[in-house]
Image: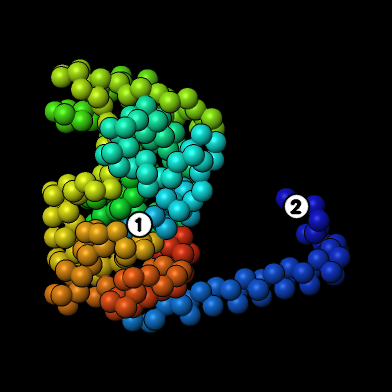
């Protein structure tokens, strides 16, 4: 129990504290009302009646948990490189040790953060409706919040595979990477391990710039959106193609599409409704009103 305001009979506490508490509650209520004003009532009606909900999530969702976006400045060894330069097949061919080390550290960084309120709200909603998640994020925060991800459109930091035969890395090879260890702020370049099947290099299981998306993941995501009652586009810039085109397929069939993003994006002009709040605020508020 806090010792700054007594709750015992005859000791109501200093009046200034009571006033401060009242002011805090009033400010909280005003803030919540302001946030609710960001919702068009039609959005809440759609969410209440939808039985099949399809979600496309992007970097903004993970950023609320502390995962840096590709626009976040790097530090240490990585300050010499831009993420856009490292996340390419050309960088992998030129300096696989640097690229491999960068992805190992990125995976460790993700393991060091937790799902946020937006992730948890989606997992909770999925208990009541058929909710599918297609994500442009390569982390595992949706899964750790309790959701099942239908499509990792850009791959996963935790799915390593052979660059040649595409055989998944063995469990012990992944274990040696110590992905649950703290991030090394000044790591040394680390040579990638070899495939046990063909001796080629094990590569990160992500889609690099210039590579095609896995067709099965894209097709599953598109089907989920065209068959949904409601599509939510959450925390994505609407720039990275072809994933950004997925909600357009739903719009073409008359499926209502809601964008949740604190800022306007390339997709905003196409969305039926927009909610100008971070997903970690908007989704719990939406769940509270269902």
Q: Residue at x 37, y 70 (%)?
A: 265
Q: Position of residue 14 (x, y in %)?
A: 86, 65
Q: Residue furthest front?
A: 94
Q: Residue at x 42, y 38 (%)?
A: 106
* Residue closest to the eye, 194 or 116: 194
Residue 288 placement, left or right of 213? right
| Residue topped by disc 1 | 58
Q: Position of residue 9 (x, y in %)?
A: 82, 62
Residue 196 placement, left or right of 264? left
Q: Which residue is drawn at 46% across and 77% down?
A: 38
- Between marks 1 and 2, how big is the CA–CA gap? 40 Å
Q: Where is residue 272 in the image (x, y as percent from the top left)?
A: 29, 79
Residue 38 placement, left or right of 240? right
* Residue closest to the eye, 205 or 39: 205
Viewport quadrant of the C terminus: bottom left
Quarter of the figure with residue 30 = bottom right
If you read the primary sequence from the N terminus, does the residue marked by circle 1 or circle 2 appear first?
2
Residue 75 placement, left or right of 265? right
* Residue closest to the eye, 226 or 32: 226
| Residue topped by disc 2 | 2
Q: In this view, does 223 lie above or below 208?
A: below
Q: Does residue 188 show up?
A: yes
Local crowd at mark 2 within 10 Å, few (<14), some, or many (≥20)?
A: few
Q: Does residue 156 show up?
A: no
Q: In this view, does 1 lie above or below 287?
A: above
Q: Is residue 270 above or below residue 233?
A: below
Q: Residue at x 81, y 56 (%)?
A: 4
Marks 1 and 2 in Cβ contact (< 8 Å): no
Q: Which mark is residue 229?
A: none
Quarter of the figure with residue 257 = bottom left
Q: Position of residue 178 (x, y in %)?
A: 42, 24
Q: In this view, does 211 lie above or below 132?
A: above
């Amino acid at each position: 129990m806090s010792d700054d305001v007594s709750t015992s009979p005859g000791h109501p506490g200093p009046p200034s504290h009571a006033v401060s508490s009242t002011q805090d509650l009033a400010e909280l209520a005003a803030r919540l009302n302001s946030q609710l004003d960001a919702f068009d009532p039609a959005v809440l009606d759609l969410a209440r009646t939808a039985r099949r909900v399809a979600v496309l999530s992007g970097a903004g969702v993970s950023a609320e948990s502390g995962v840096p976006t590709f626009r976040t400045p790097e530090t240490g060894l990585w300050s010499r490189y831009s993420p856009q330069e490292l996340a390419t097949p050309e960088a992998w061919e030129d300096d696989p040790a640097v690229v491999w080390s960068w992805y190992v550290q990125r995976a460790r960084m993700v393991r060091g953060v937790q799902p946020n309120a937006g992730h948890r709200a989606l997992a909770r909603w999925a208990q009541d409706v058929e909710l599918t998640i297609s994500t442009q994020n390569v982390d595992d925060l949706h899964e750790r919040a309790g959701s099942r991800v239908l499509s990792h459109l850009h791959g996963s930091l935790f799915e390593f595979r052979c660059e040649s035969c595409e055989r998944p890395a063995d469990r012990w090879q992944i274990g040696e990477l110590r992905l649950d260890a703290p991030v090394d702020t000044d790591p040394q370049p680390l040579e990638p391990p070899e495939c046990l099947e063909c001796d080629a290099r094990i590569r990160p299981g992500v889609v690099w710039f210039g590579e095609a998306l896995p067709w099965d993941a894209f097709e599953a995501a598109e089907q989920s959106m065209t068959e949904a009652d409601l599509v939510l586009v959450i925390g994505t810039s609407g720039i990275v193609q072809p994933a950004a085109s997925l909600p357009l397929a739903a719009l073409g069939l008359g499926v209502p599409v809601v964008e949740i993003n604190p800022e306007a994006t390339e997709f905003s002009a196409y969305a039926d409704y927009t909610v100008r709040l971070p997903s970690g605020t908007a989704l719990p508020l939406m769940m509270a009103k269902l």
